[in-house]
Image (spheres, grey):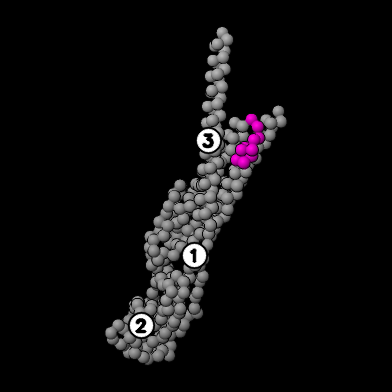
Amino acid sequence: MFLRYLRLILVVLVIVAGLIVVVWDLGEEYTWIIPLNTPRHVSSYYSKSTTIVALVDLESEKRSVIVYSGVIIDIIVNECLTCYAIVVASGLNFYVVLFTTILTALTILLVYIEKNLKLIVILLLVLFIIALITLYLYIKAGENIGYDVREYKSRPIKLENLTLSLIPMGDKKILAFNYTLRDNITKLSLVSVKISNYEYEKAFILVNSSGQIILGRDKLVFYVENREIEVLVLSQERNLNNTLEYYKLEFTPQQTNSQLYFTITLTLVILHSTTITTKSIKKILEKRRNQSISAYKQENRV
């Protein structure tokens, strides 16, 4: 009688522990910021039931939103040299539900097939707890995927009393009024340079990025990394009725152990499942063999 109640208590505890992990995951919403200087994969280790990808374009100053629902293992966001992505993942994680269901179901099976609390049963129950703890760490590690972003924005710079000088343009030089702004970029950054109240053909922007020249009219948006950039506003007039705006988003990869925790959890699930499945098969075969022996003895007695 005591053993039966003990089994019931263990089953309830196992189910509650599994539900707690699933509820933790359900309440966990991730927000990841990703630069798009190259095509990017949204983390394949976190397949949430709802994933929203918002593309923020600094050039057009527009935002487009794509919503993914259901089990999607991998999402690829295309390159956009004037954009970055904000990814919001919410709902249930497919892997968490799968791993928790397997661990919980097989642990309950283990409790019922073993008549006594042997050492192997205790070890497998401990393994179940360790797997759930690692699964929880994996859930929390998802918060550190993506990039940490710092925003730099200069005050509007009035374009007046510009300097007249010769500006190198490839093999030639041009004489123009100009304003110069320099910045040393040490990390991957998305830079926006804008002339407000722009008047066509009165001025234009030239950016010298370590010898690479980029030309634009009222606005330039570009990715740059580990370079010193020189922004020049070239004008036909000394004083313009305009202001220059300089804006920069600096991306730093975040450190995360999500892949490690995922791998450890998967290994524990496989080890746990293999051991219990093997024991279950042995129990079934042993039971059948005993039934066959009993049937054989009864026939011989007759």
Instruction: Identify the residue position indicated by label 2 in the image.
Output: 203
Q: Can residue 205 be seen in this view?
A: no
Count of numbered labels shown in the rendering: 3
From the viewer's perspective, is 180 left or right of 172?
A: right
Q: Which residue lies furthest to the left in this view?
A: 171
Q: Is mark 2 on a helix, strand or loop?
A: strand
What is the x, y in percent for residue 39?
39, 61
Instruction: Identify the residue position indicated by label 3 in the image.
Output: 277
Q: Which mark is residue 55?
A: none
Which contiguous range is marked in magenta? 115-124
Give yes or no for residue 257 being in the magenta stretch. Answer: no
Out of 45 and 197, give the one closest to the viewer: 45
Residue at x 39%, y 83% (from the top left corner) = 232
Q: How crowded is mark 2: few (under 14 residues within 10 Å), some or many (20 or more)?
A: many
What is the x, y in percent for residue 87?
47, 58
Out of 103 and 149, give the one closest to the viewer: 103
Look at the image and tell me in which quarter the N terminus lies.
Answer: top right
**Label 3, label 2: how many angstroms apart (C-alpha)?**
75 Å
Sequence-first disc among 3 and 1: 1
Instruction: Report if the CB atoms under discs 2 and 1 are less than 8 Å apart.
Output: no
Q: What residue type is labelled 3?
A: Thr
